[in-house]
Amino acid sequence: MKTNTIFLTLFFLLVLGAVFLTDCSQRTTQTIVEGDAAQQAYVPPGEYDEFYAFMSGGFSGQVTAYGLPSGRLLKEIPVFSKYPENGYGYSEETKAMFNTSYGEVPWDDSHHIELSQTDGEFDGRWLFVNGNNTPRIARVDLTTFETVEILEIPDVAGLHCAPFITENSEYLVSGTRFSVPIPQEDVGIDTYQENFKGLINYVSVDPEEGHMELAFQIEMPGYNYDLARNGKGKSHGWSFLTTYNSEQAHTLLEVNASQKDKDLLAIVNWKKAEEYLEQGKGQTRETSFYHNLMDESTSIVNSTEVTETTILNPQDCPGMVYFIPVPKSPHGCDVDPTGEFIVGNGKLSADMSIYSFDKLMAAIESEDFAGDINGIPIINYESGLHGILQKPGLGPLHTEFDGKGNAYTTFFISSEVVKWDVESLEVLDRQSTFYSPGHLVIPGGETRKPEGKYLVAMNKITKDRYLPTGPELAHSAQLFDISGEKMKLVLDFPTKGEPHYAQAISAGKIVPNVKKFYRIEDNGHPRAAKGEGQARVEREGKEVHVYMTAIRSHLAPDNIEGIKMDDEVYFHITNLEQDWDVPHGFAVQGATNAELLVMPGQTRTLKWKPFKPGVFAFYCTDFCSALHQEMSGYVRVSPANSDVPLKWGLNNENTTATNMREQAEQQLAQRVDD
């Protein structure tokens, strides 16, 4: 009977969803967009956007940076996937970024962006994002827009619930999406209830350098941990995580994990967890995970295997974890700017539950519980409620806030964004989206001080919005002006990959700190050539190291002979430029691992294995000057038993380290005279 009821409910929701989709498809630009919309999104040539929006790329594994309100794509930042455009993951310096306990994993599924915070506001220093499939958290340095660190999270499966930051960036909180045997062992899947467990993970962030460290994990019942937010203001020190599959089903979850009317919201007192950790309550467990950290002076990634983790068990740590019922199959979990209200959405519920932090604390204080699960008290549902937002739409997913007492929630099935009053729980406005939005973002909308000017809805489906591109259409983002009482659609713009989640920040918090070039004198790379006088070629057995420099408009050396078959050639390219936006590229014929893009003052290395005897060209791949085409050279490869001596030079001369610069200057002077 329950199964039939669930099928009927799902059918009803899908039919209603189809009605809404049909309704949306009948809307036209003329009926939706008001006359001045284009002006609101228009940023004149040469002017900057007001905000950066960082979007996770979903299955692309990357992050993209857009300007708002223009929707202009500024940069794709490679994170969890190799990226031929700049050689990320191909250069010898960055290959180790993909080390995991599963070996090299060069592709992942990025989901949630978190910008670093100070006092509950974005501070513009770092950006964090999770890898969903192989559980990892990455850190991007927002002075360089480069990925500088990836930390694997052990003993979890599907790190969807990550990485949610506390208001002073003390921790990044995550939870396992799929519970698994811990430690992993060969057991029957039908022993799920006995052997499968969940973990909630706390990764500490160094306040000065941003370096991450797995501080502790909390062992939890074998549910699916979906999304989280941390408290702010009065609720700082607490974490809130939605869970589903409290039925602990292991097959046909669309039915069997939807049996109960309510699932559970986990509530964690992480300051209490810290106290238990100091008291030695944590148990050390052997495991294996990798920490990959770039040395920013050398740009070389160092990879370290960690073999221990510390686990806290709620049964040994009273007052650390609580549950409270939440509408069935919950997804989003969001905390308002005051820290008082916690929104728990049930995807299969017609209503939304809004919790009060004060009431939750009062219920805990009075032990107003309805039993426990594995020693974790369950707070009575009604005791923790601020109220219920009744029938706001179909399929509520995510909520953000404008800082004026209003919340905005996406509804996947009814394809809309609904604005509602957090205190009175009154629906104030609703606007259709095209179509089926997942996350939404308001600049600062998850902080204590949102900048409630714009809202971006990230849509899962894009039919009829852009020119078709074969079976797969561009995914879509839609920009709404929310400065007035009513939301107003002002722009569509396509995104890369799946636009899963985004965070947006005032450009003024990033632009002043952007690094324009790496100071050549600070380059600590052991293979750097900090001037053409240091350019050279050295043989170390079968390894040949080419210390090459790049400057407009030549590479030095530009002729190399004496390379033999079976050699491994390492081209260490140092970009000598000390100016903004003058990268140089490098590619050599027959290379099987893409080219490099080297920022000013930086050193990057390409490994090349000669494939046959002959003379092969190399060149700069990034158009850098009027004489960019001339920025090239040759490398000669001889048979393995050849006696061709190692020879290298510039301007057709075998040269030494002492006169390379003189030759280059003479060459440049001759060009000027010509």
Image (spheres, grey):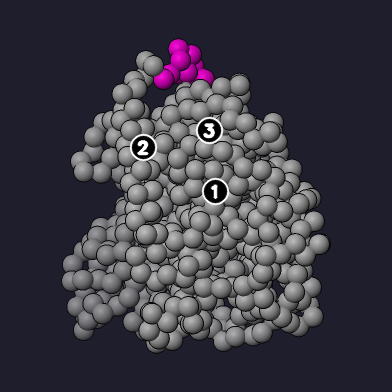
Query: Disc 2 marks which residue?
Result: 16
* Mark 1 and mark 3: Cα distance apart in space: 13 Å
| Furthest-top residue in this view | 35
Q: Which residues are magenta?
A: 32-45
Q: Amino acid at mark 2?
A: Leu
Q: Nearer the viewer, mark 2 or mark 3?
A: 2
Q: Earlier in the sequence, mark 1 or mark 3?
A: 1
Query: Disc 1 marks which residue?
Result: 345
Q: Tag 1, which secondary structure?
A: strand
* Mark 2 and mark 3: Cα distance apart in space: 17 Å
Q: Nearer the viewer, residue 566 or 29?
A: 29
Does any portion of residue 106 appear in the rendered image? yes
- The N terminus: image quadrant: bottom left
The image quadrant that residue 279 belongs to is: bottom right
Q: Earlier in the sequence, mark 2 or mark 1?
A: 2
Q: Which residue corresponds to the image point at 61% horizontal and 80% vertical from the top-left? A: 309
Q: Residues within 10 Å of mark 2 (few under 14, many from 20)?
A: some
> In the picture provided, is 328 more to the left or to the right than 2?
right
Q: Nearer the viewer, residue 183 or 101?
A: 183
